[in-house]
Amino acid sequence: GAGVSQSPRYKVAKRGQDVALRCDPISGHVSLFWYQQALGQGPEFLTYFQNEAQLDKSGLPSDRFFAERPEGSVSTLKIQRTQQEDSAVYLCASSKDRGGNQPQHFGDGTRLSIL
Amino acid sequence: QKEVEQNSGPLSVPEGAIASLNCTYSDRVSQSFFWYRQYSGKSPELIMSIYSNGDKEDGRFTAQLNKASQYVSLLIRDSQPSDSATYLCAVAGSGGSNYKLTFGKGTLLTVNP
């Protein structure tokens, strides 16, 4: 596809359940990012991949959050033992090359609601 | 903690007017700055990037950067109702973390017909 694709668009889970969110970046994009956006806030950085290597995971809120990109394309963000404070929109973005100072292109996000 | 500050608004302008959106940032050595537009329930859409001091124009949009004042702005000329959205200012980190974007909370713009 032409843009970043995320699935599912909406996810409702009960507290304590595990969830997995998928991101399919723009074809050929080397860099992939996950962000968390709370209502009324700007996106906040979670983690960064360059190809299959996770170079920065400093923004992950706790060890319940785990992200992977095993083949350097599709990425999955997994949240274990979900809590109500995990409710947010999770955005994936990709950029063409490695390194920074480059525009990042966002998917439509997954809206996660924890009951 | 690197910070990016924006007026949350809402900023209301009449159709055809100039909308002026402002952003300040705390990391003095940041080099890259981006404006994103986000419609309700949609993803942030990149509309401008700016890397050097001065003005950069693209159609009805002009980004202005003043690194000495740590200030970046976005002007929208001939505002249209379709421009009504939240505008996010994003600043890239410096040095080895220049891939990491820090966003402001966004300014809600309403263009009234």
Image (tube, rainbow, N blue to C red):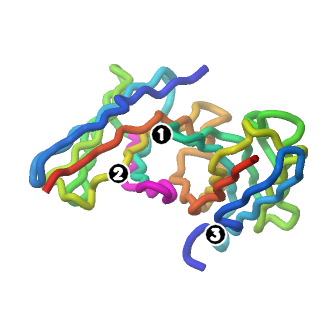
Q: Which residues are magenta?
A: B39-51
Q: Are marks 3 and 1 in contact (CB under 8 Å)?
A: no
Q: Is residue A110 above or below residue B69?
A: below
The circle drawn on residue B85 is 2
Q: Are marks 2 and 1 on the same chain?
A: yes
Q: Nearer the viewer, mark 2 or mark 1?
A: 2
Seen at 70% across and 50% down, the residue is A113
Residue A54 as seen in the image, left or right of residue B60: right
- Residue B109 lies in quadrant: top left
Who comes first in sequence, dot 2 or dot 1? 2
Q: Is residue B47 a member of the stretch shown in magenta?
A: yes
Q: Which residue is mark 1?
A: B90
Image coordinates for residue A103, horizontal then vertical, percent: 51, 53
- Amino acid, disc 1: Ala
- Amino acid, disc 3: Ser
Residue B30 as seen in the image, left or right of residue A30: left
Q: Which residue is mark 3?
A: A5
User: The residue marked by circle 2 belongs to what chain?
Assistant: B
Which is nearer the eye, B88 or B56? B88
